[in-house]
Image: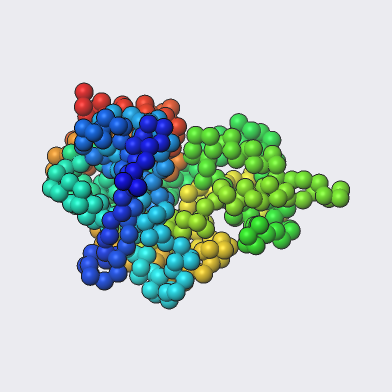
Amino acid sequence: MLNTYVVNGLVCQDRRFTVPLDYQQPEQQKLSVFAREVASKSGRENELPYLVFFQGGPGFGASRPTGLDGWVGEACKHYRVLLLDQRGTACSSPVTAQTLGHLTPEQQAEHLAHYRSDNIIRDAETIRSALIGDNKWSILGQSFGGFCVLRYLSASPNAIEQAFITGGIPSLTRPATDVYRKTFKRVLDKNKLFFDTYPQAQAIARSVAQHLLTTPETLPDGSPLTVERFQLLGIHLGMTGGHQELYAMLEQAFVEVNGVKALSFVFKQSMLSLLDYDTNPIFAFLHESIYCQAFASNWAAHEVRHQSFANDFNVDEHSQSFNFTGEMIFPWMFEQFSQLKPLAQAAQLLAEKDDWPPLYDLQQLANNKVPVAAAVYETDMYVDIAYSNETLQQVNGAIAWCSAAHEHNGIKVDGANIFSTLHKILNP
């Protein structure tokens, strides 16, 4: 078949499925959902059971395989792996400013409200029925993908043979403000580690911030480069390799032009490439809503930042330390990012939405019969370990594997070992 090919020993087959935008009105607008099935040659021939992968995010497509290596190679010893581009991401009817441009703000907000984990799991069930009927499959969720796993365990547990989670155990009941009070503290810890490791980085970061407060700057796409936008680079401090990448960028922040110190084009271009809110807007739109159940987010991170996170840099306070922020979303981002700006009204409507349906069935999780193994990272900047452990205690039979050696993106860096460990926990 034309949609089947081999990449370094990994047999790939591209699949597409049609699903409704709104499962309450299934005959209305349709979406195309893309999934790439990958397997070893023997795994495909022997029709090994399926493992479905839910990517982190929200708003990012599944990882693209490079062969029988990493966690994919390890998983293919036991499964055929289905790499799912969740609705609105990558090749699945992508959501961007371009594709939403013909809608009114009200229509945009209504449309985007259908992209949380509840509908992602409904899509998965549609795909399961098409591929294997009533048979079960196993699931793996990384980061936000773990939120999807817990939704799956709540809504359709009879579909699941085993469940694996890496770095993605949310609180089942707490509002976003509680989450950000915890994670902002983690962000400060990562800032301290970064600036302790690279002492000269504080002076460079302060110089960039002072320059931006006194000199208007734009990025190569014409959008403004501000102090608060510069601070967003801290999202990478919770990843293995993120500290090194950020420092390498700071080292090239300035150049001399005709004897005058100026921000370099290399630095500005790096700002565009390292902050992907323009290309993956679902992340900005729905990041806070993934915590919302019958209450509004009301820009929770923005509220917490000004309540308890002394992080607004002021050029007049010469003794003030510079700090980066983390994974948080702020309302001003919809003014400064070129591809978010046309969608600002929709973002405000979503922030005010207070009728989000519940995502988790606490009774079902308390009575859970599906084997669950979860990798929990002790210094995770994005998912607080205290809330992760709190949730795992509410999921009957869930087994936690705690690691101080891995950051949030552990599955990308050491995925074969992590997946092998979790698989052995459930399959000794």
Q: How many marks?
A: 0
Residue 146 visible in the snapshot: no
Identify the residue shown where x is 31% and y is 32%: 40
Placement of 161 over or under 266, stated as above or below: above
Instruction: Give residue 205's position: percent from left, percent from top.
Output: 67, 44
Identify the residue shown where x is 56% and y is 66%: 335
Instruction: Give residue 383's position: percent from left, percent from top.
Output: 39, 43
Residue closest to the far front: 1
Residue closest to the far right: 259
Q: Identify the image quadrant of the C terminus.
A: top left
Placement of 66 over or under 176, stated as above or below: above
Describe residue 220's horizontal placement relative to residue 335 as left or right.
right
Describe residue 274's horizontal placement relative to residue 407 as left or right.
right
Describe residue 299's horizontal placement relative to residue 127 as left or right.
right
Task: Tell me the colour scheme of the image.
Answer: rainbow
Identify the residue shown where x is 23% and y is 64%: 23
Placement of 238 over or under 92, stated as above or below: above
Of residues 107 and 260, which is closer to you in this image?
107
Of residues 284 and 53, which is closer to you in this image?
53
Asked where in the image residue 393 lies, by quadrant, the reply is top left
Of residues 209 and 43, which is closer to you in this image?
43
Instruction: Give residue 280's position: percent from left, percent from top.
Output: 46, 56
Identify the residue shown where x is 33% and y is 29%: 74
Instruction: Give residue 331's position: percent from left, percent from top.
Output: 50, 63
Placement of 336 over or under 366, stated as above or below: below
